[in-house]
Amino acid sequence: MSDHQADYPIASMCRLLGVSSSGYYAWMKRRPSRRAEADAALLAEIRAAHAISRGTYGAPRIHAELTAKGIRVGRKRVARLMSRAGIAATQATVSRDLLELGAVKLKRDGSIRYVMPDQVELGHAAAKLDRLLAEWVDAIIPAGNLLVLKTPPGSANLVANALDAAGLEEVAGTLAGDDTIFVALVDGASTGAVAAMLQRRRSGA
C-alpha cells in the first residue's frame, strides 16, 4: 500500500482490503527483516574494519578482512553497503586497490580511466612498459631461469602489471612483492637475452 499512498488514502485501501488502519500501521512498525538485520550487523563489522584502517581501506581490503574473520559475504555487497553508508577510502587507496586487481591507467577520449590489461592496446602497453622500466626499475638481474627486477619500495606491482599487459612472448608470468619482481620465462627463452632486451628498452636504445 505504501507504493500507492500518493494516489489513494491509506484508510480507503485498508477498507478495500478488509484490514484496519491501526493494524496496517502496527505492521509497518514491526522489527526489520532478517536481511535488514544482517545488513546492519555486517555494516557494523565494515565500520570497525574501516576505523581500524584509519579510513584507508576500500571495499576489496575490507572484504578481505571480513573473509579472514570467517564472515562469508560477497565483495559487491560490501561495496554496496559502504556506498549506502557513505563509507569511502582515500583516493590513494582506491588507486592501490585497482592496481592490485591488475587495472592500469589509460587516457581515452581526453579522460584518464582504469581498464583491465586485456583492454589495453599492445602499442600503448609497450610504450607504458618502456616508460616504467626507465622510471622505476633499478636493476635487472638474471637468476637461473628467472629474471629479478628491483624497484623502489611500493613500485613492484606497477611494473609487473605493465610487463603482463605488454604481452612479451618470452615472458610466462610475473610475481611481485614490495620492491622485487620475479619474471618467469617461457621454455627455451634465454634469461641473458631477455635481460639485455629489457635493459635496452629501459635505456631507450
Image (cartoon, rainbow, N blue to C red):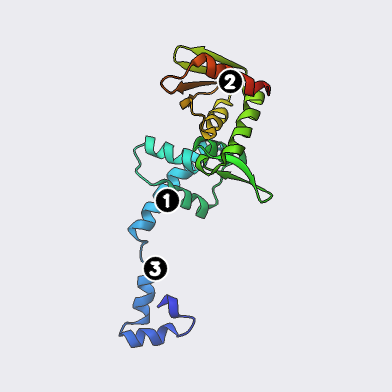
Q: Is residue 11 visible?
A: yes
Q: Closer to the N terminus: mark 1 or mark 3?
A: 3
Q: Secondary structure at mark 1?
A: helix
**Alpha carbon distance from label 1 to label 3:** 26 Å
Category of crowding for the residue at label 2, using alpha-carbon neighbours closer than 10 angstroms: few (below 14), some (14–19), many (at least 20):
few
**Alpha carbon distance from label 2 to label 3:** 71 Å
Q: Quadrant of the N terminus?
A: bottom left
Q: Closer to the N terminus: mark 1 or mark 2?
A: 1
Label 3 sits on what residue type?
Lys
Picture coordinates of residue 85, whole percent (x, y): 51, 53
Q: Which residue is mark 1?
A: 77
Dots 2, 3 in contact, CB < 8 A: no
Q: Secondary structure at mark 2?
A: helix
Q: Nearer the viewer, mark 1 or mark 2?
A: 2
Picture coordinates of residue 166, whole percent (x, y): 54, 33
Dots 1, 3 in contact, CB < 8 A: no
Q: Nearer the viewer, mark 2 or mark 3?
A: 2
Q: Closer to the N terminus: mark 2 or mark 3?
A: 3
Category of crowding for the residue at label 1, using alpha-carbon neighbours closer than 10 angstroms: few (below 14), some (14–19), many (at least 20):
some
Label 2 sits on what residue type?
Met
Mark number for residue 197? 2
Label 1 sits on what residue type?
Arg
Which residue occupies the foreground of this view, 160 or 20?
160
